[in-house]
Image: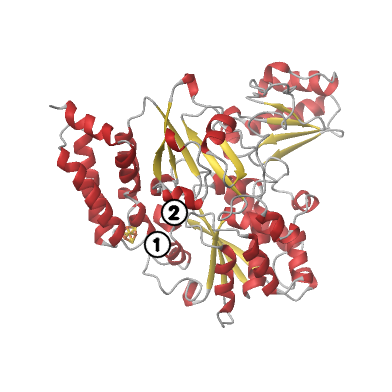
Amino acid sequence: HQILVCAGTGCTSSRSVEIQSALRRELLARGLDGEIAVVHTGCFGFCELGPILVVHPERVFYCQVTPNDVPEIVERHIVQGQTMDRLLYKHPPEGASRNTIDENEFFHPQIRVALRNCGIIDPENINEYIASGGYFGLAKALTAMKPTEVIETITRSGLRGRGGAGFLTGRKWAYTAAVKETVKYVVCNADEGDPGAFMDRSILEGDPHAVLEAMTIAGYAIGAQQGFVYVRAEYPIAVHRLEVAIEQARRAGLLGKNILGTGFSFDIEIRLGAGAFVCGEETALLNSVSGKRGEPRTRPPYPAISGLWGKPTLLNNVETYANIPQIICKGADWYAAMGTSGSKGTKIFSLAGKINNTGLIEVPMGTSLRTIIYGIGGGIPKGKAFKAVQTGGPSGGCLPAEYLDIPIDYDSLMKIGSMMGSGGLIVMDETDCMVDIARFYLEFTQDESCGKCTPCRIGTRRLLEIITRITEGKGTMKDLDLLEELGHDIKEASLCGLGQTAPNPVLSTLRHFRHEYEAHIKEKR
Ligand code: SF4
């Protein structure tokens, strides 16, 4: 037997560390500690029902476990070979025995590429990563592929940047590789800051070696010898596991000088961010890594030409990198066979808000919102009606029920006035006020604006004043035109992505829920 206990941030905050200690104590007391391993893993994804524990080899899935349940689990499951019914998942699909992790509605429809090791391996043990196929992609790239072949494979896979903009990853690599410079850098953007988003955090907590392996492959492909992971200091578990992983990879000869005896050298350092949302913007992030104020600058020049310390720099986010080793191992065609024609592969989404199964999921691009919200997500709590879903965090938009059946990918979301963003999905039910929701996001972006350019600094402030006036019942119909006009001006004239997308929640709610704004205005009369 092996008992896997979730040690992601969610389960850790609901005492999973105590559960692990209680399991080890109980097994020791019964003389079973030599036979049964207790392994702490990254997030399983089903955060709603944490703390989660899975017993192998049967793969029985126990939810909402407490330290007090441990003696009974050991006695009933390990010693007597029975399952503990009261801790099993409560909503099995038709015909399932509901005992195993593979059978329930949350896990069954998912395809896990970037999350493949999360909840499976001990993220602080490099041997478990290697045993699950880890560093095979790096070995293949370094020994059997030319740098151009690596880039060609990534390009043909169709992988697009998972941080939000959706730029073709292989093309970005090719641009950086083409610049003739002896010093180049590879950077990982782990400055995830959208409210309700925890995709990158969970990858770093559950599978940090995947990101290190991918960055090293990228270094080989573009001709860089140094990488940086820019991660926010509010992610202490992720930072700790990254530190452990870097140390282990160096000791194993998988980072540092002469990797695997191939003559290629590459090392990675961590840089901690102080929690400014704007530092997720690439030029602000690069400024922050090099010790300057975290403010965006105009582009061009793009980081591929002039990034860190003026040198060519390749920047991708955590989820993008987490796909790379698998693409190298299994090939571009394997990856490109998943998803839609314009958006290949899978995408991680964090489910939050008014949804039964809060958590982290990975599905092929093109999956409908209905499958995600009503299938995997288990629908809306207390049988309430669905009203809207916010996709893409503060940069995205609110979509009403009529869009539940569109296949979601980069392009379809743009067409309907929202965006993929990094993958946060926040669900609203019939009791939520869409004007309040728009106001919440605007307050966030207005607060996070770095203040460098006028349209964003002053424009978001004015937008917030107008929308506040409406929520307080002091607005007029003219204010709605003003919101739209000003929103479009801010999008057009702002320097960086933060300002260019800040009005989206207001504009999309005005487009789809204008009657709620009008109701606020009419109510006062
Ligand atoms: Fe700063 Fe906003 Fe201008 Fe971006 S758009 S540079 S966040 S003021």
On the image, the x and y values in percent for residue 150 come to: 68, 69
Query: Residue 376 at x, y = what percent?
Result: 59, 32
Question: Which quadrant does the C terminus fall into?
Answer: top left
Distance from disc 1 to disc 2, alpha carbons, whole Å, reads 10 Å
Q: Where residue 236 sits: x, y (%)?
A: 55, 47
Q: Earlier in the sequence, mark 1 or mark 2?
A: 2
* Residue 464 in sight: yes
Which image quarter: residue 119?
A: top right
Q: Quadrant of the N terminus?
A: top right
Q: Residue furthest top?
A: 86
Label placed on residue 294: 1
Q: Secondary structure at mark 2?
A: loop
Q: Is 493 rendered above or below residue 57?
A: below
Circle 2 is placed at which residue position?
A: 274
Q: Circles 1 and 2: CB distance less than 8 Å?
A: yes
| Mark 1 closeness class: few <14, some 14–19, many ≥20 residues within 10 Å | many
Please say if 288 is above or below 37: below
Residue 281 placement (x, y as % from top left): 43, 59
Q: Is residue 481 above or below residue 212?
A: above
- Residue type for callout 1: Gly
Amino acid type shown at disc 2: Ala
> 301 or 390: which is nearer to us?
390
Callout 1: helix, strand or loop? loop
Q: Is residue 324 left or right of residue 2?
A: left
